[in-house]
Amino acid sequence: MPHSREPAELHVDGQGRVELPVGLVAEPGISPGTDVVAFSYDDGWIVLRRAEDAMKDLIKNGRL
C-alpha cells in the first residue's frame, strides 16, 4: 500500500484512541465531520477510508 507522506509517530492512549495530524487526514480529503470506515489490512496496517468511497467500492466491486 503506497504512501506519499512522511510517517508520523503517534500514541495510542489508554482508551485505544489515536489523534491524527490534520495534514495526514486532509491530504486524502478527510475533514472534520467526514464519516470514515476503518479496517485492518494484512499484518500491521490499519486503513481509514472515506465512508462514501468505501461504500461505492463495495457496491461496485464487492469489496472495500
Image: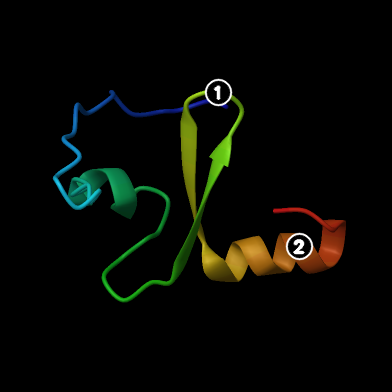
In the rendered structure, the answer to whether residue 40 lies left or right of residue 14 reads right
Residue 22: where, in percent of width, then height? 20, 51
Q: Amino acid at mark 2?
A: Leu
Residue at 61% from the left image edge and 27% from the top image edge: 42
Vertical side of 34 occupied by 23: above or below: above
Q: Quadrant of residue 8?
A: top left
Q: Amino acid at mark 1?
A: Asp
Front residue of 35/3: it is 35
Which residue is labeled 1 in the image?
43
What is the residue that sits farthest to the right in this orientation?
61
Instruction: Work out which quarter of the rendered image holds the N terminus and state it.
Output: top right
Which residue is labeled 2 in the image?
58
Mark seen at residue 1: none
Vertical side of 22 occupied by 43: above or below: above
Residue 46: where, in percent of width, then height? 46, 39
Residue at 37% from the left image edge and 61% from the top image edge: 30
Vertical side of 18 occupied by 56: above or below: below
Using a 10 Å C-alpha cutoff, classify the residue at mark 2 as few (fewer than 14 neighbours), some (14 to 19) or many (20 or more): few
Front residue of 26/60: it is 60
Q: Secondary structure at mark 2?
A: helix
Using a 10 Å C-alpha cutoff, classify the residue at mark 1 as few (fewer than 14 neighbours), some (14 to 19) or many (20 or more): few
Residue at 74% from the left image edge and 60% from the top image edge: 57
Residue at 45% from the left image edge and 64% from the top image edge: 36
Q: Nearer the viewer, mark 2 or mark 1?
A: 1
Mark 2 or 1 closer to N-term? 1
Residue 11: where, in percent of width, then height? 16, 35
Looking at the picture, the colour scheme in use is: rainbow
Residue 27: where, in percent of width, then height? 35, 48
